[in-house]
Structure formats: C-alpha cells, structure tokens
Amino acid sequence: MRAHQALRLAGRRLQRPLLSPPRPASTILLSSSFSSSSSSSSPASAAAAASSSATEAQTSRPAAPAPSNPALNFPCLDAIESRSARLSADSSSASRAGLSSSSSSSSSAGPEPSYTSGDTLNYHCRDPLLLDWGGVLPSFNIAYESWGRLNADKSNAILLHTGLSASSHAHSTDANPAPGWWEKFIGPGAPLNTDRFHIICTNVIGGCYGSTGPGSVDPGNGENYATRFPILTMQDMVRAQFRLLDHLGIDRLYASVGSSMGGMQSLAAATLFPDRVSRVATISGCARSHPYSIAMRHTQRQVLMMDPNWNRGFYYGRVPPHAGMKLAREIATVTYRSGPEWEQRFGRRRADPSKPPALCPDFLIETYLDHAGEKWCLTYDPNSLLYVSKAMDLFDLGYENQVATQARRRAREDALATASYSPSESAAACSLTLPNEPYQEQPDSTSSSASDASEALFSPANPASSRPPDDLIRGLSPLRDIPTLVMGVASDILFPAWQQREIAESLRLGGNRNVTHVELSEETSLFGHDTFLLDLKNVGGNLRLFLD
Ligand SMILES: CC(=O)OC[C@H](N)C(=O)O
C-alpha cells in the first residue's frame, strides 16, 4: 500500500463527528506527538475523548453555536502521533524488561531502531584518533565491506566513499545478499570491475552503520556519546579510513572514488595523502561547501533539533525524534532531485483528485516527499545526521583553511603529548553562542571587492568565467600529479555544475595535466544531484573509461 493511501485510510478511521471541537494542531504536536512522556495518548483515544466531552457538553449545556464549516482532517499528523505512541509503548516495555538504554544504538532494545545495514567486516583501531576541531576518539570502529580480490602486491585497491545516507553496502555480499546502492556499478566487467580491482567501502565515522558515531558507547564513561561526540570533518573520516588501509597493509590506492559527500572525501583523501592515492574520481562533489548547500542543511538540522524528542541528542533508549527526521529528509529530498524531473514525473497531479484539497499531503509531489520522509525517519540515527551534515558544511579545501587546521591540530597534539589535555579544557570548543546582534545587511555585501572577485566568477551568475580563487588552486596543489576525473550534472542544485568546473579548473591551473572533466547536460539527466545513483550508462561509463 502506498504511503498516501495508508495516510488516507488512517485519516478515515480517525475522522471525528463534524460537531466535535476541532483540536488545535499545535497543541497536539506538543502534548502527544512531540512528547516522550508516558501520558501521551493515541490519536484514536484523543479523538474519542474529544467526542465524549462534546457529547457531555451537549447534554449538560445548551448546544454551542455550530461552526460555519467543519474542521479539516490531518491524517499526516495522526500518522506521526501513532508512531510516537507505538515507539513510546515499545520504550516502556523495554524498560520494564530491564533493558539498558545505553548499551548501543545497534541494540534491538527499546524504541531505537537498529541503525545497521547488515553484516559487515569490522576493524577496531585501539589508537586514539585526534579530530580536526580538537576532539578525540580514544579508540574507534570502522565497519566496511569489500568486493574483488586484493592482488599479491596490494596495488589494486579502490577506496569507495559513500554519500551522506549510504552505508558500506554498495554491492551485495555473501554475508548480506541484499542489493547495494551501487549494485550495477560494481562487479565483473562493471565500472568498478571486480575482475581487476579490490573495492573497499567503509561506513564513515560519525555515521550509524557500525563505525563509531554519536550512538556508540564512549569508552570513557560507558554511555552513548550522544552530543558529547566531537565535531568532525571529512578529513577526520578519511584519516579513520586510512587507519583501516594501514591495518590491511595497503600503502597506495589504485584509486579513490566517491560521489556527493563521497566526492568531497575522495578529494580530501588525495590532499591528505597524495603519496597514497594514484587516481581520484570525484562525482557530483565539490572542493568547498557553498552557502546555499549550508543553508539547506541548516534548515534540516534546525527542524530536527526543534523536535522535543531530540532532547539535545540524549534520546537513546527513548522515543527518537522521528518527526524532525521525517521533515529533515523531506527538505533533503528537495535538494537531491530537480524541479524539471518533478515537472515530468508529477506535474500538478493530485494524489486523489476526487477529494477536496487538504492541508496534509495532497499533490503527488507532496505524497512523494512524505513517503521519502516516512521511509527514512527511523533508519538513520538523528545525531549522525547532525554531525555528518555539519562536517559537509565545514568542508573547505582552500589553502588557508588547511593551514589553520594544521596549526590547530599541532597545538592539540602538543597538549595531548604533554598530558595537559583534559576533556573539560576542550570545552572551549563547545562555547559557541549566538551573536549579540542579529545579522545586519552589509552595505557592500552584494558588490565584489577585488580580493573576492575571483570567487564570484564561479558562481552560477557568471558561468562563462573560468578563474577559481587562488586559495583553492593552492589548496588543491597536492593533487598536481594525480590523474583526476571530475564529473558533474547540470541539473544538480545541491552541488551545482559550477562547483565541479571549479575543481577541474583549479587543478589545471595548479599544473595538473591529467584532469578529465565531464558534465552531464540536462538532456542527459534531469535527476539532479542523485544522478550518480541512477545513471549507469553515463556516470558508470565515464568512470570505467577513467579507471581502465
Ligand atoms: C549529500 C549526499 O551525499 O547526497 C547523496 C545521497 N542523496 C545521500 O543522501 O547519500
């Protein structure tokens, strides 16, 4: 049954008599859907209570004046309230059974879903990992999967980096036969050809698929890290991956390959370890996050954090912020596809034109987004979304940012070496406050000064131009001798095509003579950012050519 059909059915079941007092939606959200307290009642009982109090009122008092029109139904809210009630009941029965709430996010106890994608290989690194913003993981786990045979001199390994939501399960394995997210891109004769290459795909640290993340247990106190997990960067994720490569005895990669967030990591791997990466493929990625993408992730994080069930990150063993997650995913989905695709796919069609318009999902595009949110809201750890999406915002391969990061790391390393470091000292890293003054429009914010003129050149407003900022050319200079494939898609609004042009041009201006830049036109793909998941012919075809 499709989600919108299910919602309509739920709505019909819960329909109240026309004369019962309408429930203000905001009150309901705060008192039951958004509350993890055990007093929350099911929508059905709330409706029954409302109806019986209306009956009492009718018998004991003169009939209230009738509203001019009936109240609307809100099946979309009913569905969220039902889920809260179900999760809350699961939570209570788990705690009655004495199951610990801090065992692990992958525990099946309580209402927390199991955030794993199936069986993986595991590497536990006992050496601490210092993160770019000063945090430390005393030890960490990397969950990963691999395909194809590693050759005798270990020279045929390809490290495949994932997008934000994808797990290491890029292709089926014996341990987990479910199809992976790049099932057709990996295999004998496929673009990532397992007859030739040994493909390794890891789950990123900060995520929730088995590698250490906010849902993991902090060895320091035996509790979930939650929002005591340190801020991390793409480079931190990559450093953790290279610890795995060290463990596997792989000195040098045949290639570093990734799309979207993985495209960021693919570049980060080569800037951090240029001697260990022979080729780079970055697909629908960027060299620095631009403000529009930060803005879109900001809105996702805000709706998630405003869900009271988020509880500042301490929801493990309780009802997770599934409503915030659902809304965050709906916003994210808007950025992953394209308007023209939806014009073709949904147009202005409504899910059920026989019904009058509603405030809950009604147009097909609305039911599609609703369904995307529903599918996702219990399959990914909300805290992981916050940390990983922030790491994407922080991504900037500009030279100045790299130098500042190195200086910060050195200072922290010194502090750690002299044992003068303590977690409370690093509390300064958590001292962000809101600015005293709200944002004020800057008089010259729309005109480009001489120093930032080159940055403006790569904006969509000036697509014909070709000079990226010197800071980025310098920042990408470690890749000068590394053959690089940069692929992008014209219909991508999240990592727009000018960002891949920017990477390619920065590399060329930095002296790299082996840069292949491919841009898939709107005629080729209207699928926007997620084209890399779908277009085997063009994305896969160009990748195969590059790796051969
Ligand atoms: C940002 C990003 O990696 O997007 C790719 C894909 N939509 C995903 O969520 O994984």
Image (cartoon, rainbow, N blue to C red):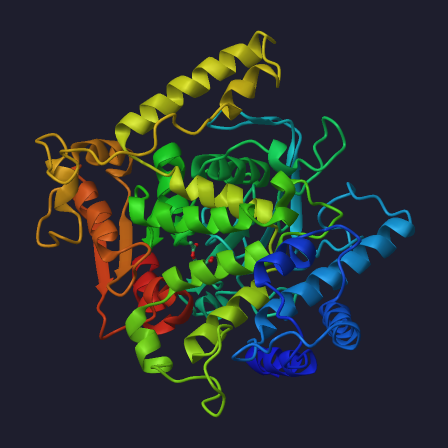
Name the image quarter holding the C terminus. Answer: bottom left
Give the side of residue 457 with respect to residue 478, left or right: left
Using the rendered view, name the quadrant where residue 473 is placed. Answer: top left
Residue 390 seen from this side: yes
Name the image quarter holding the N terminus. Answer: bottom right
The residue shown at (70%, 32%) is 218
Give the side of residue 187 with respect to residue 470, left or right: right
User: Residue 165: where, in percent of width, then height?
Assistant: 51, 56
The residue shown at (71%, 68%) is 43
Ligand 1 occupies quarter: bottom left
Give the side of residue 20 with respect to residue 244, left or right: right
State whether residue 335 is above or below residue 315. below
Q: Considering depth in this image, is 359 or 100 the residue closer to the camera?
A: 359
The residue shown at (16%, 33%) is 470
State whether residue 312 is above or below residue 55. above
Residue 290 seen from this side: no
Using the rendered view, name the quadrant where residue 39 is placed. Answer: bottom right
State whether residue 155 is above or below residue 346. above
User: Residue 125: where, in percent of width, then height?
Assistant: 64, 34
User: Residue 211: where, in percent of width, then height?
Assistant: 62, 44
Q: Name the residue at the right extreme.
A: 97
Q: Name the residue at the bottom extreme.
A: 354
The residue shown at (17%, 49%) is 459
Give the side of residue 67 with respect to residue 462, left or right: right
